[in-house]
Amino acid sequence: MLTPERLEKFGEAAFGVSWKSDLAGALTPYNPSRAIVTYRIVQRWVTRERGIPDWVEPAVRNLARRLRIDLGARADKLREFE
């Protein structure tokens, strides 16, 4: 189960300082209702003002895989500058 604490931990690791806005944008394409996910919605999930919808957990897993692959590819490109 995706808890608010785990969502926050993922958001900070994946997107850094502006993680709520960036995570909201990254989650929007996964939203089955097609509604835009906003910073405020993510904030409400983290503060437990609203429950985290079931579709968010698989979306976060997918994003984590995609970001890990992308970061690995970028790290490989940066090696030439060491």
Image (cartoon, helix red, strand yellow):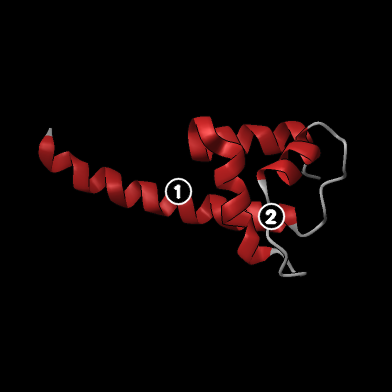
Q: Separation of disc 2 and disc 1 at Cα?
A: 22 Å
Question: Is there CB contact under 8 Å for labels 2 and 1?
Answer: no
Residue 28 at what x, y percent from top left? 64, 60
Taking the image as shown, residue 3 lies to the left or right of residue 75, namely: right
Residue 38 in picture, x, y percent from top left: 68, 49
Secondary structure of residue under mark 1: helix
Which residue is under mark 1? 68
Point out the image quarter for the N terminus.
top right
Residue at label 2?
37
Residue that appears at 20% across and 48% down: 77
Q: In which quarter of the image is residue 55?
A: bottom right
What residue appears at the point 28 percent right and 43 percent down from the top-left corner? 75
Q: What residue type is labelled 2?
A: Val
Circle 1 packing at 10 Å, graded few (<14), some (14-19), many (20+), is: few
Q: In the depicted view, which residue is nearer to us: 49 or 61?
A: 49
Question: Which marked residue is nearer to the observer: mark 2 or mark 1?
Answer: 2
The residue at 72%/42% (across/down) is: 40
> In the image, is residue 44 above or below residue 74?
above
Q: Which residue is drawn at 46% across and 50% down?
A: 67
How many discs mark residues in the rendered view?
2
Name the outermost residue toward the left.
81
Q: What residue type is labelled 1?
A: Arg
Residue 25 seen in the current view = yes
Quarter of image, res 26: bottom right
Tell me the element at label 2: loop
Q: In which quarter of the image is residue 3?
A: top right
In the picture, measured across the screen, residue 33 lies left or right of residue 17, that is right
